[in-house]
């Protein structure tokens, strides 16, 4: 489905489905920010209440977790949104 990290192939190698009509826009970024934000803020609150670590520990944990989870989630979410577009036959709006 993917040619690079986030770019779609022109078409499916197995069935020939044309991927040029799929456009997930900012959808994957929104879901990644929402999921990662909840996880990182929840973990930061837990760390602060339980251990009271210094600020550099918060920065190290939050920065590493934010970047790692974002890179881990963005590709599957983009693929999922493309699959939902295909399954629901979503198209660009047409004016009459």
Image (tube, rainbow, N blue to C red):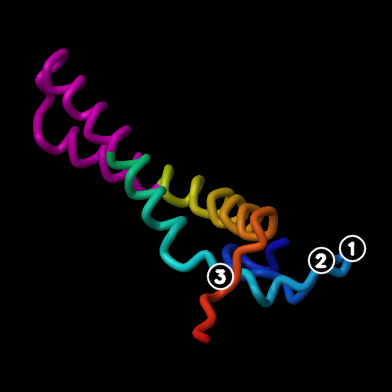
Q: Position of residue 32 (x, y in %)?
A: 40, 49
Q: In this picture, which residue range is highlighted in magenta?
A: 38-67
- Dots 1, 2 in contact, CB < 8 A: yes
Of callouts 2 and 3, the N-terminal one: 2
Query: Please, which residue is most extreme toward the bottom here?
Result: 96
**Quadrant of the rendering where the N terminus is positioned:** bottom right
* Residue 53 position in % (x across, y down): 12, 24
Q: Residue at x 22, y 34 (%)?
A: 41
Q: Residue 95's x, y, as percent?
A: 50, 84
| Secondary structure found at label 2 | loop
* Disc 2: which residue: 12
Distance, label 1 to label 2, CA atoms, is 6 Å
Lower sequence index among marks 3 and 1: 1
Circle on res. 23 = 3
**Helix, strand or loop status at disc 1:** loop
Secondary structure of the residue carrying tag 3 is loop
Name the residue furthest top: 50
Report the number of discs. 3
> Would residue 31 be found to the left or right of residue 95 on screen?
left
Q: Which mark is residue 15?
A: 1
Residue at 37% over, 40% down = 35
Label the magenta part by its dominant secondary structure: helix
């Amino acid at each position: 489905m993917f040619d690079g990290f986030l770019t779609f192939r022109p078409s499916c190698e197995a069935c020939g489905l044309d991927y040029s009509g799929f456009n997930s826009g900012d959808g994957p970024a929104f879901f990644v920010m929402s999921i990662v934000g909840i996880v990182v803020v929840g973990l930061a609150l837990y760390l602060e209440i339980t251990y009271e670590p210094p600020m550099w520990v918060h920065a190290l944990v939050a920065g590493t977790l934010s970047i790692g989870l974002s890179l881990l989630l963005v590709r599957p979410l983009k693929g999922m949104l493309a699959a939902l577009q295909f399954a629901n036959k979503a198209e660009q709006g047409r004016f009459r």
